[in-house]
Image (cartoon, grey):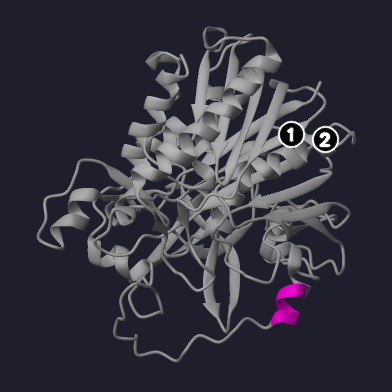
């Protein structure tokens, strides 16, 4: 039995209202919002957050592979999946792979993972993440959102069993971005939907139904990707599905999240599924991939604390348009009067690999004192070289003191610098993000979140900040 073992999604905290963007150009905007990655988030950090959510509560000692699917990877020459593997502390004995350059990269990675999982005993993790951009004063600016999804695929203890799958591939230029393009381009929407999207998706769904000897009424949920809500709904109804069977896209709430769009829908469908439900999952991009799953009696495993519903509800939709442009690097702003940021010392960053990526400190074997960062000498009993590794990434913490720093370099000044104390012991000084300033207080509960610290000389430097965990208590 091969299928989905667990799943997790991630949607950024900030939202940009369509009417806010339109008002900047003297126009009246449509209703709705789009999710916006914070200035310290990218496709890697969002994928890491989704992966952590997918792995929450799972006792998986070893992964066979970690895959990263995105059309907006931070690097053109360097794997991103290795960062995800490092954050999860997977070790070095595993496969990693990046899938890119198409909106079907996520389902392509899923197909590869299912093939591998059917042959190997250990599960495979697939992450899907995108931060696609549209040019200012265009439809893509407000239609495209940021987000991520992750799926653990394996052959044991699955929550959704794979029944069948088909793939159709055809070169189709309807939405694209050239190597030197920053913003997404598209061709005539009528041509794209009538000549490419609709016939290809129809072929994929009909072929899978034929192989399964099923009809649309046999499925509880249809998870169908589409460039926009209107055309994907029309296609679903044309195929014989009812409005009630069509899984919500959330495009009006978070926008079209590219490779993560269908993944977020699938996570939501699994979170509300019951044993015995059948789910049809269909993606699109230069062809179509279609999968059929049956939910097992492990369905409750999909109901995560950090669910899609929680992310849709937990938000700040007051983001000003000017700040959005600044975060996305779409305007030139006066530089802060501070020295330019230097690139991280790469040998030092590598020496502290497990601390930086997997948030390891240490614990004294003699007295049990827990400290961060790792030390050779115990601060309590002064024992030398008696420390063992201790991981903090899944621990909640309490803010002991904080300061509002308006002088340090930042795309969103001021920075909120906090000193936190982890449950069980250990203190760390870091930044608090995704939290209104008026909600910050001594004693508030926070949890670690993998973020980008800065970029210099083409190198992304990542570390751990904290976000509020007050709603999770």
Expressed as whole percent of the image width and height from the top left, the position of residue 420 reads 52, 57
Q: Quadrant of the N terminus?
A: top right
Measured in 3D between alpha carbons, the distance from the residue under mark 2 to the one under mark 1, in whole angstroms, is 7 Å
Q: Is residue 118 above or below residue 391?
A: above
Q: Is residue 289 above or below residue 143?
A: above
**Mark count:** 2
- Residue at image location 30% in from the left, 52% down from the top: 142
Expressed as whole percent of the image width and height from the top left, the position of residue 137 reads 24, 61
- Residue at image location 79% in from the left, 70% down from the top: 377
Q: Is residue 224 above or below residue 69?
A: above
- Of the numbered discs in the image, which one, if any, rests on residue 416? none
Q: Which residue is mark 2?
A: 117
Q: Is residue 248 above or below residue 226?
A: above
Q: Quadrant of residue 381?
A: bottom right
Can residue 306 be seen here? The reply is no
Q: Secondary structure at mark 1?
A: strand
Q: Which residue is mark 1?
A: 153
* Cβ atoms at labels 2 and 1 below 8 Å apart: yes
Q: Quadrant of residue 456?
A: bottom right
Tell whether position 203 is magenta. Answer: no
Of labels 2 and 1, earlier in sequence is 2
Q: Secondary structure at mark 2?
A: helix
Expressed as whole percent of the image width and height from the top left, the position of residue 101 reads 59, 57
Question: Which segment is the magenta one?
Answer: 346-350
- Residue at image location 46% in from the left, 14% down from the top: 240
Nearer the observer, 80 or 448:
80
Tell whether position 348 is magenta. Answer: yes
Can residue 40 be seen here? The reply is yes
Q: Main secondary structure of the magenta part?
A: helix
């Amino acid at each position: 039995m091969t299928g989905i073992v667990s799943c997790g999604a991630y949607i950024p905290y900030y939202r940009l209202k369509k009417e806010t963007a339109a008002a900047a150009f003297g126009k009246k905007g449509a209703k709705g919002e789009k999710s916006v990655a914070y200035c310290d988030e990218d496709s890697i950090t969002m994928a890491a957050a989704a992966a952590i959510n997918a792995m929450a509560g799972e006792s998986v000692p070893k992964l066979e592979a970690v895959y990263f699917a995105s059309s907006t990877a931070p690097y053109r020459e360097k794997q991103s999946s290795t960062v995800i593997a490092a954050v999860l502390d997977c070790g070095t004995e595993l496969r990693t792979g990046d899938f890119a350059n198409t909106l079907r990269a996520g389902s392509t990675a899923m197909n590869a993972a299912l093939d591998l999982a059917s042959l190997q005993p250990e599960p495979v993790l697939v992450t899907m993440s995108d931060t696609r951009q549209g040019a200012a004063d265009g439809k893509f600016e407000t239609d495209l959102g940021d987000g991520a999804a992750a799926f653990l695929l394996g052959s044991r203890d699955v929550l959704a069993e794979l029944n069948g799958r088909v793939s159709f591939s055809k070169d189709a230029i309807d939405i694209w971005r050239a190597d030197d393009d920053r913003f997404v381009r598209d061709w005539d929407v009528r041509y794209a939907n009538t000549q490419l999207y609709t016939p290809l998706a129809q072929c994929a769904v009909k072929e899978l139904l034929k192989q399964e000897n099923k009809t649309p009424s046999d499925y509880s949920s249809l998870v169908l990707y589409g460039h926009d809500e209107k055309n994907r709904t029309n296609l679903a109804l044309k195929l014989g599905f009812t409005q009630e069977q069509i899984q919500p896209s959330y495009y009006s709430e978070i926008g079209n999240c590219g490779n993560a769009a269908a993944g977020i829908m699938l996570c939501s469908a699994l979170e509300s599924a019951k044993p015995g439900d059948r789910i049809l999952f269909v993606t699109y991009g230069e062809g179509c991939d279609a999968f059929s799953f049956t939910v097992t009696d492990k369905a409750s495993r999909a109901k995560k604390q950090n669910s899609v519903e929680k992310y849709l509800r937990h938000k700040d939709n007051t983001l000003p348009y000017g700040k959005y442009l600044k975060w996305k690097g779409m305007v030139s702003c006066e530089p802060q009067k501070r020295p330019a940021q230097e690139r991280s010392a790469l040998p030092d960053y590598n020496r502290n690999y497990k601390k930086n990526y997997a948030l390891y400190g240490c614990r004294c074997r003699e007295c049990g004192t827990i400290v961060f960062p790792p030390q050779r000498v115990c601060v309590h009993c002064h024992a030398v070289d008696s420390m063992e590794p201790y991981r903090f990434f899944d621990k909640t913490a309490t803010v002991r003191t904080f300061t509002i720093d308006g002088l340090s370099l930042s795309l969103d000044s001021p920075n909120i610098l906090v000193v936190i104390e982890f449950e069980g012991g250990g203190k760390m000084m870091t930044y608090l993000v995704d939290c209104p300033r008026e909600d910050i207080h001594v004693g508030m509960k926070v949890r670690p979140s993998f973020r980008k610290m800065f970029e210099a000389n083409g190198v992304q430097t990542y570390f751990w900040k904290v976000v509020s965990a007050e709603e999770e208590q």
